[in-house]
Image: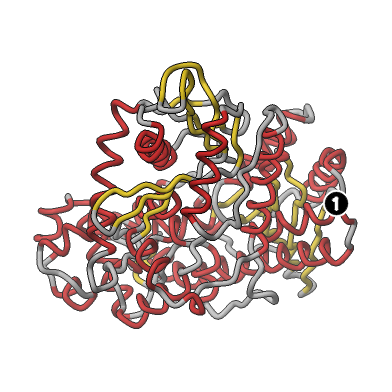
Amino acid sequence: MLVSDDLLLYYQRCDRRAFLDVFGDSRQRDPLDQFLLKLRQDSRSHRREVLSQYHYQRPDWSGEDWYEGTQATLELMEQGVESIYRGVLAASWLPGVELVSKPDLFVRHPGSSRFGDWFYVPYDIRFGKRPKLDYQIVGAFHGLVLSQLQEVWPPTAWLVLRGRNPHGVDFLKRVPQMQQLLSDCIVSLRQPQTPELFLSRQKCNLCHWYSFCHHAAQSQRHLSLIPGITPNRYSQLQGMGIDSLAALVETPRSQLKMVFGAEAGNQLAQQAIASYRQQALLRDGAITHLFQSPHNRWLANPQGAIEIHFDIEAEPDLDLDFLLGSLVIDHRHNRQTYYGFMAKSPQEEALVWQQFLELMESYPQAFIFHFCDYEVKTIQRLAKLYNTPKHRYQALINRCVDIHWWVTHLTLLPVESYALKPIARWLGFNWRNPQANGAQCICWYNEWLSEQKQDCLEAILEYNEDDCRATYTLKTWLTQFLKPYYLEAINPERNRIINY
């Protein structure tokens, strides 16, 4: 069995992924999407920038035979070369277990080892900005393998991060953690069955086994597909003997409250019912939220003469909001008009901000609907950046309505996630390009900047318009869903309903 640094890295994130990487059918992997390719390209650029600071040599090996690579790397170490790029070291660990370490660099330092009055220290070049624990564990793994072959531990392993000083791994803390994880990883890989499934939306979306696992989860109606069920809560549910959605629905709410707390237990019970019945429910306490919200006035006139739906596309690495999209719904004339204010270069951000401001101010009474709080934060950021008078941008903010807030505080939906796409698709809305997403738009925009392909801008505008229309679809449904509750709540018996 070969246990490499990459395998240990992914085992920390998901034991199932590590197992599938070794034993799974590679034909069932998802193809690399453009965003992942961009991340890899950016990572390579960062690596080249760092490597330009070193005088390194590369071992002469085919790249396939670990033994051959180890011998070639050791030859350079015995020569005492300054640094080694793309070296590899393999060392026996347990009977039948070989450890394979491939840091970006081995750098010579003065000291003592079997090579002479020098030893080597591993350097990992990471595109991230933080010294994540899983990176540090891999650094400790490099130290372990290196110590087996140079017969002395390096004092540390270095993480060369983006925009940060190199971070030294504290071996005193990380080596014991690494050894425990390594032991667990070996045990897992020796088991005949695939590790249990748990689908985590944030951690799993970029994994090449995502579709494979997601299909399995859907076929099982797995509890990890229920919003609010975290890995810790899943373990607690298993401890209670709850291993299916049906079992969760049948569990007394008082029992869930006792285990998870009153609020979380109650929410979990309600979400389970919504998912099991495949229907929307009014969340407990929703009417109170409705009247406490400072932006509840839109419900009094949910379909005014004009309403606006607002969505932004951004490039975080450039600190740039390059598209401010707005769908203007004119109910008076039964007309829908999309405006996509696109910065075709970073220097045009100020221009599109002014264009957006002027459009919003041309409809001073219209509510501005958006999904999540990023749009309001962007208005504040752009206003500050471009010295917009407070009365101008504050007037916009006062008209903003965060539909995500209303959905998550007032409703429970039979969806896997309360992001815009799952909710809108549950309502029957479909994006014209089903593969498009915010990450893909970043790729298209960078492709536009480098190659000036007009179809990249057109794809971004189409996706952004669909986001605006999805927000409109959701807002329209939410209005219809809440209307009877709202009308009942404002009648003379309102206090009875609120206190119910």
Horizontal relation, residue 252 to residue 190: left or right: left
Q: Amino acid at mark 1?
A: Ser
Query: Can residue 290 be seen by looking at this rendering?
Result: no
What residue is at 83 percent from the left and 38 percent from the top?
350
Relative to 178, is 491 above or below?
Answer: below
Whether 242 is drawn above or below 366: the answer is below
- Residue 122 visible somewhere in the drawing: yes
Q: The C terminus appears in which quarter of the rendering?
A: bottom left
Asked if residue 268 is positioned above or below residue 397 in the image, the reply reads below
Q: Position of residue 479 (x, y in %)?
A: 52, 68
Quadrant of the image occupied by residue 136: top left
Residue furthest out toward the bottom = 219
- Disc 1 on helix, strand or loop? helix
How many dots with numbers? 1
> Residue under circle 1?
450
**Nearer-the-camera pick, 320 or 193:** 193
Coloured how? secondary structure
Q: Residues within 10 Å of mark 1 (few under 14, many from 20)?
A: few
- Residue 126: percent from left, percent from top: 56, 39
The residue that appears at 46% across and 27% down in the rendered structure is 115
In the image, residue 121 lies at what x, y percent?
48, 28
Q: Nearer the viewer, residue 366 or 474?
A: 474
Residue 338, horizontal then vertical, whole percent: 79, 64
Q: Quadrant of the N terminus?
A: bottom left
Point 66% across, 37% down: residue: 57
* Quadrant in which residue 471 is drawn: bottom right
- Above/below status of 352 relative to 415: above
